[in-house]
Amino acid sequence: MSQIVKPYSEEESKKSQVGKMFDNIAPYYDFLNGFLTLGIDSSWRRKAIGSIKNKNAQTILDVATGTADMTLEINKQLNPSQIVGMDLSNEMLEIGRKKVQKKGLDKLITLDQGDSENLQYEDNTFDAVTVAFGVRNFENLEQGLKEIKRVLKPDGQLVVLEFSKPTIFPFKQLFNMYFKYILPRIGSLTSKDPRAYQYLYESVQVFPDGDDFLKVLATTGFKTYQCKKLSLGICSIYSGFK
């Protein structure tokens, strides 16, 4: 089991702290995502959705949907009959709801507040489940993955997009310097939350990326799993089937 890193205090649960953190930074989240990744984050999301094998998937759940960028990309690429986005942070969801409504997709896309480790959906409901930059924030990673597997239909696919740790010299050293020192400084000044982007760095360091995450997928019952590294290992797409 991976080490638990929390955004704020040790006393309160990670789950409640993560929810509060994203409520705090919600107004700045989209801008900082694009700014701090130089806009690469949108291409990562496109590639993640593109890795869904069943192009005829009709019901798709996006866990930790945030401001709903993944749900909008799912609709753009796959045009399913139902998309559900779920997140802990209602402030993030409110921004997502405005985006969805602006595009006239509020009858297709539903955004629910909920707990990734106790999903409110029936067994065998979704053809595919996506999680972009969210599994790192699960309080109990294995429990969250088991819940996702439960709500997937037989042979349904999980696609996870998550930060990982580059290993190529000297890019590894340069990126770590940016990620550890520069990015949190910019994030704290812009988002008004000095801990949020320090937590981002810390949570990536303890997250079991690469082969270690594939082992977690295996132990939680997924099959035919794989990892594809993006942008010299800054980010990875993981895929597994029920």
Image (cartoon, rainbow, N blue to C red):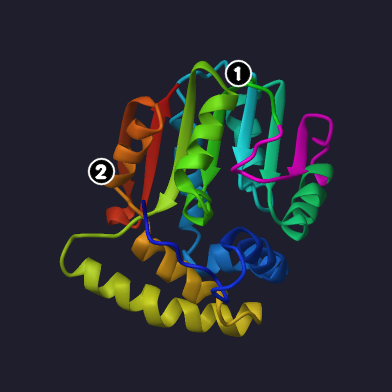
Q: Give the residue type that dot 2 points to.
A: Asp
Q: Which residue is mark 1?
A: 124
Q: Give the residue type that dot 1 points to.
A: Asn
Please give the name of the residue rendered at 50% of the width and 33% of the height, measured from the top-left corner.
146
**Most foreground residue, 174 or 22:** 22
Q: CA distance from mark 1 to mark 2?
A: 27 Å
Q: How many marks?
A: 2
Please give the name of the residue rendered at 83% of the width and 36% of the height, measured from the top-left corner.
106
Query: Could you tell me which secondary element the residue under label 2 belongs to?
Result: helix
Please give the name of the residue rendered at 68% of the width and 23% of the height, measured from the top-left corner.
122
In this rendering, would 51 be left or right of 189? Answer: left
Label 1 Cα crowd, 10 Å radius (few <14 / some 14-19 / many 20+): some
- Does residue 46 appear anywhere in the picture? no
Rendered position, 110 above or below 233: above
**Most foreground residue, 166 or 35:** 166
- Residue 36: give x, y in percent of width and height: 49, 69
**Most foreground residue, 84 or 213:** 213
- Residue 126: give x, y in percent of width and height: 61, 23
Q: Which residue is mark 2?
A: 211
In this rendering, would 94 be left or right of 86? Answer: right
Q: Is residue 82 magenta?
A: no
Q: Quadrant of residue 222?
A: top left
Please give the name of the residue rendered at 25% of the width and 43% of the height, measured from the top-left corner.
211
**Most foreground residue, 30 or 205:** 205
- Residue 71: give x, y in percent of width and height: 65, 39
Label 2 Cα crowd, 10 Å radius (few <14 / some 14-19 / many 20+): few
Query: Could you tell me which secondary element the residue under label 1 belongs to?
Result: loop
Query: Which region shows up in magenta?
Result: 102-120
Viewport quadrant of the C terminus: top left
- Residue 239: give x, y in percent of width and height: 40, 32
